[in-house]
Amino acid sequence: MMIMRDMKVKKIGELKLVGFRVVSPGDQYIIEIPKAAAKLKERVDEIQHLVNKQVQLGAFIAEDITADLDGYWVGMEVEKIGAIPPGMVSLTIPPQTYVSVFYQGLNHGIKDAYRDMHEWAEMNGYTRRRDLWHVERFFRFDSGEQVEVELLDTVESK
């Protein structure tokens, strides 16, 4: 069963992440991202300046602009970027405005939640920014199937 609640627009300041970048063919992300999330969970204690070790973040740009921005980042939010553990990367996302919704359900159902978000944003006069960072804040990610996540889809500020 899919549960979505609290659809709204919110502004979020700069986000700093440390974790892994996943680059794979489009249909493989649903397989590769949970692997990266599990690896990050095993190595979370190597990351300095953690905000909350119980919450993983995912970040991506919906429109492939350049090869260096292609992919999906699985990371932990940090207050500041310190030493980056071996094999990991850092990412800084500027302050942005997002349509936000909390989604609970099967991992593959996230696509339907995004579709509903996009329809809601359009009906409420917001323009989706495919060229900026979109963020997924995972509160439950220990199972590849069931997730609890806040989806943050970047929109143009009104």
Image: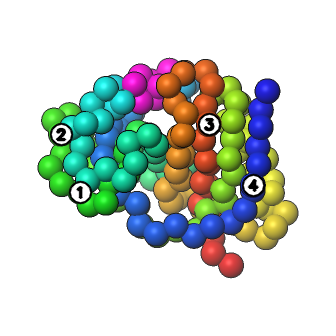
Q: Amino acid at mark 1?
A: Ile
Disc 2 vs disc 3: Cβ atoms closer than 8 Å? no
Q: Which mark is residue 6?
A: 4
Q: Nearer the viewer, residue 32 or 70?
A: 32
Query: Tag 3's secondary structure?
Result: strand
Query: Tag 4's secondary structure?
Result: strand
Residue 149 % position (x, y): 60, 41
Provide the major secondary structure of the magenta segment: helix
Q: Which mark is residue 85?
A: 2
Residue 7 % position (x, y): 75, 56
Give the foreground label among 2 and 3. Answer: 3
Q: Residues within 10 Å of mark 2 (few under 14, many from 20)?
A: some
Magenta part of the chain: 31-38
Query: Tag 2's secondary structure?
Result: loop
Q: Is residue 100 above or below residue 147?
A: below
Q: Amino acid at mark 3?
A: Glu
Q: Is residue 15 above or below residue 18?
A: below
Toward the right, the furthest residue is 123
- Location of the C terminus by quadrant is bottom right
In the picture provided, is 112 more to the left or to the right than 143? right
Residue matched to label 3: 148
Q: Amino acid at mark 4?
A: Asp
